[in-house]
Amino acid sequence: MRKFVPLSLFIFICSALFSQTALLNNKGAGIYVLNGGYMIVTQNTNGGSSGVYNALGSGSGQITNQGTIVIQGPLQNDAPITGNGDTIEVAGDWINDNTYSGNNSLVMLNGSEQTQNITGTAVTTFDNLDLSVGPVKKQSINAITTGVLSLNSAELATDVNQMLVTNTNIAAITWTSGFVSSVGAGRLSWVTIAASSYVFPVGSPSYVNGPSIFRPVAISPAAGTDTFGACLVKGNATNDGYNVEALDKTLCLVNPNFYHRLYNGSGAAAADLTMYYNATTDGDWTDEAHWKNNEWNYIAPATTSTGLGFSTVTVPAVSDFNPNPFALAHKKFQLSAGPDVALIQGQSTVFAPVIGAASGSAIEWTPDLDLTCTTCADPTANPSATTEYTITVTDPAGCKLSDSLNVAVSELGLLIPTGFSPNGDGENDVFHVLNKNLAQIDLVVFNRWGEKIYETTDWTVGWDGTYKGQKQDVGVYVWECSYRFIGESTIKTAKGNVTLIR
């Protein structure tokens, strides 16, 4: 006949009774805590073991709890533990080698002095799991929470394992400064059903790669039942084989500080994906990228905002979670240096590039030859020889793009038309020299009989097709010109014909 010990009052099991073995080992007997009853197992102070061992080594016996069990050491379970709206508080390891059935119960892992382990050979299905305060709570086996997972200020380190939350309520995971960390394929998974935002409070392990960082991710499924998972990886993704320099044609940068592993374990619903980051320490990001086909790929047009004290980037309707790396990114902005330019020696041009980068971007023109400014967008260029100029723009996020234009410079020569039409239509009404870099000029026009009918020493004016107030006939006229360019001492001469038409 199985023995049961009913506990309906405060029961203290003192360490003085057990010096070298477990404080409580039922060895196959049944322990039954009534509703409202307390069983408190204090810490062993005499150098022996502590905690509770349910049917240790016997494979029989059970604990049935409708009240509160407080254990200031580990709980090792080799036989069934059955609850019913009860509470079990454990300050040591949770070691489950059999079955635990909570029936809307609460398990509190509230050790405050050392790492607490969720371990054993059997997966524990917790109803409500409260990690309370204290150091890291570490899994060496998968675990399930069907009610509320309360992280509070603790780190739940799943390591390479999974913590699966099957409660589809978006408030099923609560935290203050706590978070879930994982390594490898470990993850925090959550069954989703509503078209709502499920926030995964994930961070990097405090025991791997220096101090942990906390960067949540929110997954907002369209509909249907799915199981999504998330894990934060601190450090450069290149170290894990996801080269942040391998980018598709749309992307310019991928976050080198951390990335996420995101999973869709079941279902096929598309989901909006929101990444949270600290702009002060992580830089500024505008997009998201997914590693696929050995490069980071731009996902979709993103929106930026803030939330939970972070800056956020959200992309809509992500349906491809294979492979699993995702990262904050920055796509290329628009940049055009402008069209090529043709000049005559002595002439200048003003550059007018098209720059789609954010304000505060750094600009640099190279080479630094014959430019009025090398760090402004619109310098004036006056090169003495053909030069290719390159503009390089670096935006506040660190995205750097370059584009070039060619300024072709022709040798000095006289620019003068071969015909004009003085008909008063406002177009080509005057015959004159087109150069704007002349220091001296003497232009003379002759009719076909050699008679001089026009002369000017001002390159800004020209012949209007009249002589002594009379319109001259349509035909070919001869011109001669002596001139000197700005910056030169030599006077040059030229002559040619011009056709007058009306």
Image (cartoon, rainbow, N blue to C red):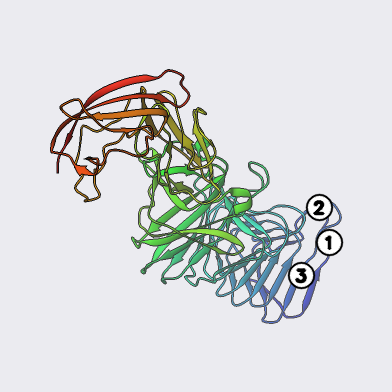
Q: Residue at horizontal 31%, vertical 25%?
A: 481
Residue 496 visible in rendering: yes
- Residue indicated by mark 3: 40
Spatial CA distance of label 1 from label 3 is 11 Å
Say whether marks 3 and 2 touch (CB < 8 Å).
no
Q: Which of 126 and 485 lies nearest the eye of the viewer? A: 485
As helix, strand or loop, the secondary structure at mark 1 comes to helix
Horizontal relation, residue 249 to residue 241: left or right: left
Between marks 1 and 3 in the image, the one whose residue lies nearer the viewer = 3
- Residue indicated by mark 2: 48
Residue 1 visible in rendering: no
Residue type at mark 3? Ile
Residue type at mark 2? Gly
Q: Residues within 10 Å of mark 1 (few under 14, many from 20)?
A: many
**Residue 222, image quadrant:** bottom left
- Residue indicated by mark 1: 15
Q: Earlier in the sequence, mark 2 or mark 1?
A: 1
